[in-house]
Amino acid sequence: MNGTTTSASSSASSAARSLLLQLGAAAALAFVVLYGVAFAESPVVHNAAHDVRHVTVKPCH
C-alpha cells in the first residue's frame, strides 16, 4: 500500500513542478515580449502596441 501512495505523491509532485516550470517560462516570455515592445526602436512595432492599448481601452499615458 505504501508503494502506491508514495508513487502517487511523487507523480503529483512531479506534475506540480512541471506546471510551475511552465508558468515560470510563460511569465518570462511575456516579460521579454512586453519589454521588447515597450522599448522597441522600430516605430512600427511600438505604434502597433500603442494602438492595441487604445483599442482595448487601457491607459498608456
Image (spheres, rainbow, N blue to C red):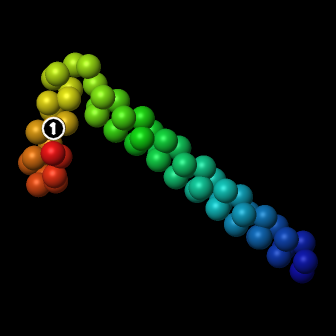
For the residue pair 50 and 25, the one nearer the viewer reads as 50
Pick out the residue farthest to the top: 42
Pick out the residue farthest to the right: 2
Q: Position of residue 43 (x, y in %)?
A: 17, 22
Q: Amino acid at mark 1?
A: His
For the C terminus, which image quadrant? Answer: top left
Q: Is residue 49 left or right of residue 54?
A: right
Query: Label 1: how many residues lie within 10 Å, few (<14), some (14-19) or many (20+)?
Result: some
> Relative to 29, does residue 41 appear above or below in the rendering?
above
Q: Position of residue 55 (x, y in %)?
A: 9, 48
Q: Position of residue 35 (x, y in %)?
A: 36, 35
Question: Dividing the picture into quarters, in which one does residue 5 lie?
Answer: bottom right
Pick out the residue farthest to the bottom: 1
Question: Dividing the picture into quarters, in which one does residue 2 lie?
Answer: bottom right
What residue is disc 1 on? 50
Q: Position of residue 54 (x, y in %)?
A: 10, 47
Q: Is residue 14 left or right of residue 57?
A: right
Residue located 52% across and 52% down the image? 23
For the residue pair 18 and 43, the one nearer the viewer reads as 43
For the N terminus, which image quadrant? Answer: bottom right
Q: Is residue 10 left or right of residue 60?
A: right
Residue located 28% across and 34% down the image? 38
> Relative to 60, does residue 13 appear above or below in the rendering?
below
Residue located 71% across and 58% down the image? 14
